[in-house]
Image: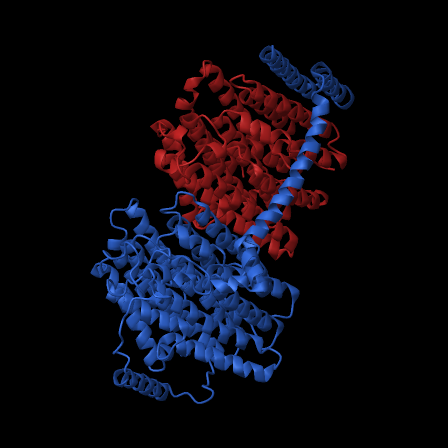
Amino acid sequence: MKILMLVTLNALACFVLFYSISYTERYSKRVLFYFLFLLMLAGLNGVILAKELIWLFMALEVASLSAYGLVAFGGEKPRLEAALKYFVLGELASLTILLGMGLIHHKIAAYLFIIGFGVKAALFPLHLWLPDAHSAAPSPVSAMLSGVVIKVLGVYALWRTIGFYPPTLGLLSVLGVLSILYGGFLAIRQWDMKRLMAYSSISQVGYIVLGLSLATPLGIAGALFHLFNHACMKGLMFLTAGAVEQKCGTRDLRELGGLREKMPVTAFSSLLGSLAMSGIPPFNGFWSKLFIILACAQLGQLWFAVAAIVGAILTMAAFLKVQRYAFFSAPRASLQEVKEVSWTMALPMLCLGLLCLGIGLFFPTVTARLINPAVVALLKTKGFFAP
Amino acid sequence: MMKPLFYFSAFSLGIFALASLITLLVVLYSIKYRAGKKHAFAYYFYTLLSLLCVGGALFAADYITLLLFWGMMGIPLYRLIGMDDTEGSAAQKALLMVGGADVLMLLGVGIVTALTRSFQIGAVPLMLNHPYAILAFMAFLSAAFAKAGVMPFHSWIPDSAKAAPATVMALLPASLDKLLGIYFLTRICFNIFMIVPNSPMSLLLLAIGSITIIAAVLGALVQHDLKKLLSFHAVSQVGYMVLGIGTGLPIGVAGGVFHMFNHAIYKSCLFLCGGSVEQKAGTTRLDKLGGLAKAMPLTFIAFLIAAFSISGVPPFNGFVSKWMVYQALLQFIKINPYWILPLLAAMFGSAFTLASFIKLTHTVFLGQPSEGMEKVKEAPWQMWLPPLVLAGLCVIFGIFAFQVPLKYLVFPSISNYRLPGIWQPNLALVFLSIGLLFGLILYGLGHVRRVTVRPPFFGGEKIDEEAIKVHGAAFYDAIRGWGMLGGLYRAAERGWFDLYNWLRGISFVCSLVLSWLEIVLNAFYGLLRLNLTFLLLLIIALEVAVELFLFRLGEREILTSLAGGAAALTLWWLVAKLRESQA
């Protein structure tokens, strides 16, 4: 489990840092950016490796605080507002977690943890900070936030803390299903590329929580695999959104168009990412969704399976919308001069895109080497919480 | 023990052989048709990828392999339809409908594997008497229907007809997707589940088949675009396959399956001919086309044979399979006399198909050459040979239906097949030939040839010939005006019968309602945000409270206080920045 999380986190961070080299050229305080970024990375690694709850909490605070700073990076007003919102809700969540730590021997602590980590994981209805923070943050930060932060600080920390505590599993399933549907339905409404992806993240975290809360080996495998896959594909999607934003100066899908010809590498990576997000075989997203839906059906939870299917179709609709408006359609007059991004940005995107395809094609190897050991480990894990 | 991933049957091998032949012909055709177009590598790559997917899905022995290849078909579909299109809406719609139905298939697989405890396809045929089984059946059905383009999952086909190149239409919706969809339909009905004739599911299939035939052919009648008209027929003809399979009777299944083979042949032939016309004449609009028979004789012959086949004119292949479907429906009436409507739908559908192809052949190839059509030349051999080969197959599959295709392709897959009634294909052929000969003799003997041509006049004054020229494109436009039918046409044109639009509408309403919920939830945060100083104090106070009341002095308190201090600092910095930016 820890190995899976560490691999996911640090592999994505590696790609994103490489991408940041030319992305951050526009900022004057680049040192501060990398300082905060690495501090956040250290905090996330700390959360994964923490042996005691108190150290988990400390690492979580380090990661969260640097994440607030990163969202605000650049200092424009929408970013500061988003960071403030993230801060307020995130700190209230931290307080709830702290309260839960104080009451660790009572049953109520489990629910406090769910609320606290639920905010960090952006589960519906605790997701309010996410659409603002993810769309306002610089793209490499959004990629990290969506790709790993919500999962490490939210989902992983929650399971490390309470484990498979039976009374809460039903509640978590319902939260997962609601997140899937809510995120999906709001994603298809958005015209801001990054906001669309942010809502889609809520939906995908819903899949992970749903899969884990089923507490069957297949469901957990699906959830962990989806966690890994989602880090790849959502990270990729945010990086492509950043590339588009940098070159075209806008993220509004209505003002974009025809980038298929202008930015071929970005378009190709974005296509790979969109197909993976849509859950089309043989991409990786297909397999993890398949596992989760099969696990729901095998438990006889047909409504969960139906919700997961509706969510998958909505995700497909949302990402095909991105493809259609940004990359298909006729090029705008204002976008005639648009060029492809520099190779330091293109390479990570292309690598992540091919990774999405590669993981999908060689999924038996990936599940056998990476996922199954994690499932076994997770099933053995006893949470810190002991009522 | 590792179970084999693939399973080869005579039936699936036959389908794959036909799919490969059609792909080969389409690739040959594309050499000239796609010459000088961009993305050549991607075009051929996706073309071959779709054949690979078809093979994988046909031979899949377990559900996972099936799902993999079946869903993978969506990628070439999406990319090929969007290849020349600058708008992207047709490709989006196609992938959303087909891919969405594929996701539904996951539900079916989930239920079936949970019920049978096996991932092998058709390990234990399920009876359709349990609600879960029926739900799984529906889920599978929608996937097969979306792939094959049966109503109500059909609307991506006419939409992509305009955007996609003709070769793509000939390859995917007309043949490969249809072969795969109907193949899977037979697996669903007789392998994964057991359809009993006259059971509710059988009647459902019959109803869907009848509606598909009639509604799509009525849509085809009034089309003014060559490719779009053909695409409506690609929907209508699937109805026959569904009808045949839906009867659950051996002859019906054989007829439906045979019709699937035939349809792939003649429809890809028609689309390829359409492509030649499009390239040589520069348009697919029927009101611009006309009189191309002399300029493009080979294309015309191929088109004519395929048109006769699709209309069910003997001795071509479409007739034989349709005849078998009729037989099945007649037998079905003996079982359930109230279900005579499918038979009527099938017969009228055939008549309307003929009517619409009379219009099409007349407007494109016969009549006076329209403006700008004088310079049209025959297509190069790469473009006329594939349609002619397919047309030749139409003839062979028609005349030697029982000797070749049915014997080797269809009957091996259908157990306990017994041929009902009297069927003498050779006798029919003899009668037909006698009839034709008789007609020719009459034509030769009569005075038909001795016609004098005079300029038309009215009241002693000559009329401009152009003014009285009738153009076939307007045939049947009159039915738009017929009361209820006219209303239905107008509704159809506005997209009222399109499932895609309905689902889009529903999801729009849902997302609108949820976005209001989002506003309400944000209002709670808005309350907190009202006063920043108060917020700062609130968070610090809460933190201190938790520290004081819950923790005794020690390591934990020091650590959490540190965290609290850092949080307060961050907040102070954020608020300061925010004030700065406001100022």
Quadrant of residue A343 in the image? top left
Residue B509 % position (x, y): 64, 44
Coloring scheme used: by chain
Quadrant of residue B38 in the image? top left
> Residue at left 37%, top 62%?
B468
From this view, report whether residue A372 is shown above or below residue A252. Answer: below
Quadrant of residue B265 in the image? bottom left
Chain corresponding to blue in the figure: B
> Residue at left 49%, top 46%?
A278
Whether residue B447 is visible, yes or no, is yes
Q: Nearer the viewer, residue B443 or A7?
A: B443
> Residue at left 64%, top 26%?
A90
User: Does residue B284 appear left or right of residue B115 in this picture?
Assistant: left
Q: Nearer the viewer, residue A6 or B372?
A: B372
Q: Which quarter of the rendered picture does the N terminus of chain A lie within?
A: top right
Residue B251 % position (x, y): 47, 80
Q: Which quarter of the rendered picture does the C terminus of chain A lie within?
A: top right
User: Does residue B369 appear left or right of residue B428 in this picture?
Assistant: left
Identity of the residue furthest to the front in this view: B460
Colour used to depict chain A in the structure image: red
Residue B150 % position (x, y): 50, 63
Q: Nearer the viewer, residue B471 or A300?
A: B471
Identity of the residue furthest to the right in this view: B549
